[in-house]
């Protein structure tokens, strides 16, 4: 998981899309470390984006289910479900941290 | 603040932090190490993953909070990533202050916040295979105690 993998494609899609990153267990179970897509209509918060991703079903529905401990950062700051997001933002989903 | 794969030299890091500064009267430090057991299982190796960019940002914010909260002179945080084995050093926090009380408190604060706010994740290798380390409720409680006014 190099920086180059995480940030590939950022330059071409920044501005019109939201950049979504996944780390640790989520990266493995969801099968990807990053993706970019236009912000879906009606999605303007972290909670909205999480619901959108859940609707993909399978591991997405399981991992991002309400009640599962998932942390989210918007533009590299810890966020909550109410945090607003817009095109061009970098949104990261990951499990509770375990460093130190 | 540094995130690196290489090991660190505690004595050298402390010497560099206080070098030439006669206002430093106390140094408090914490060193986190890889153990060979977790949750009752043998651990032969672990891999530390992080979120490049956010990690450095989070560590800087944690240190800034410590500096605004306690009368301390300087703080160093070094955190390793990549593959580590039992006995290896993982993290170093050094706080330099005029007196021990502030240095001890700030050092504990930085570690407690690092454990709940800095985006690092440990995956450990056990005889049953690899597994992601689960966050501990005790770590959240340790960080929460700093939410109460202490001064």
Image (tube, coloured by chain):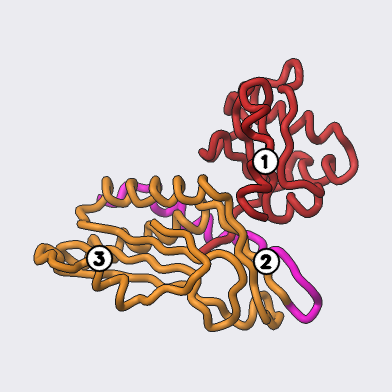
**Residue at image point 53% right, 60% down:** B139
**What chain does mark 3 sit on?**
B
Q: Does residue A48 show up magenta in the picture?
A: no
Asked whether, in this view, residue A59 is left or right of residue B20, the answer is right
Query: Where A93 sits versus B17, above or below?
Result: above
Kindly indicate whether the residues beneath marks 3 and 1 are on one polypeptide chain: no
Mark number, residue A19:
none
**Residue at image point 24% right, 73% down:** B15
Question: Nearer the viewer's eye, disc 3 or disc 2?
Answer: 3
Q: Which residue is mark 3?
A: B17
**What chain does mark 2 sit on?**
B
Chain with red colouring: A
Q: Does residue B141 show up magenta in the picture?
A: yes
**Residue at image point 66% right, 33% down:** A19
Report the span colored magenta: B126-151
Q: Nearer the viewer, residue A57 or B57?
A: B57
Expressed as whole percent of the image width and height from the top left, the position of residue B51 reads 58, 50
Q: Which residue is mark 1?
A: A8
């Amino acid at each position: 998981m190099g920086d180059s993998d995480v940030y590939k494609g950022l330059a071409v899609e920044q501005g019109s899309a939201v950049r979504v990153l996944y780390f640790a267990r989520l990266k493995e179970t969801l099968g990807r470390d990053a993706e970019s897509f236009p912000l879906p209509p009606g999605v303007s918060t972290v909670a909205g984006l999480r619901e959108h991703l859940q609707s993909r079903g399978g591991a997405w529905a399981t991992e991002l289910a309400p009640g599962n401990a998932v942390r989210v950062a918007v533009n590299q700051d810890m966020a909550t479900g109410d945090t607003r997001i817009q095109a061009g933002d970098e949104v990261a989903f990951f499990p509770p941290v375990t460093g130190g | 603040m540094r995130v690196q794969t290489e090991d660190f030299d505690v004595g050298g890091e402390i010497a560099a932090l206080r070098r030439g500064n006669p206002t430093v009267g106390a140094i408090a430090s914490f060193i986190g190490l890889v153990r060979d057991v977790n949750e009752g299982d043998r651990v032969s190796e672990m891999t530390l993953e992080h979120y490049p960019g956010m990690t450095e940002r989070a560590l800087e914010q944690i240190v800034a909070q410590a500096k605004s909260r306690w009368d301390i002179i300087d703080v160093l945080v070094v955190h390793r990533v990549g593959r580590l084995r039992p006995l290896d050093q993982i993290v170093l926090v050094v706080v330099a202050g005029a007196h021990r009380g502030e240095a001890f408190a700030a050092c504990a604060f930085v570690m407690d916040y690092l454990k709940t706010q800095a985006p690092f994740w440990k995956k450990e290798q056990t005889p049953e295979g690899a597994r992601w380390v689960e966050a501990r409720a005790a770590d959240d409680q340790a960080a929460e105690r700093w939410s109460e006014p202490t001064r």
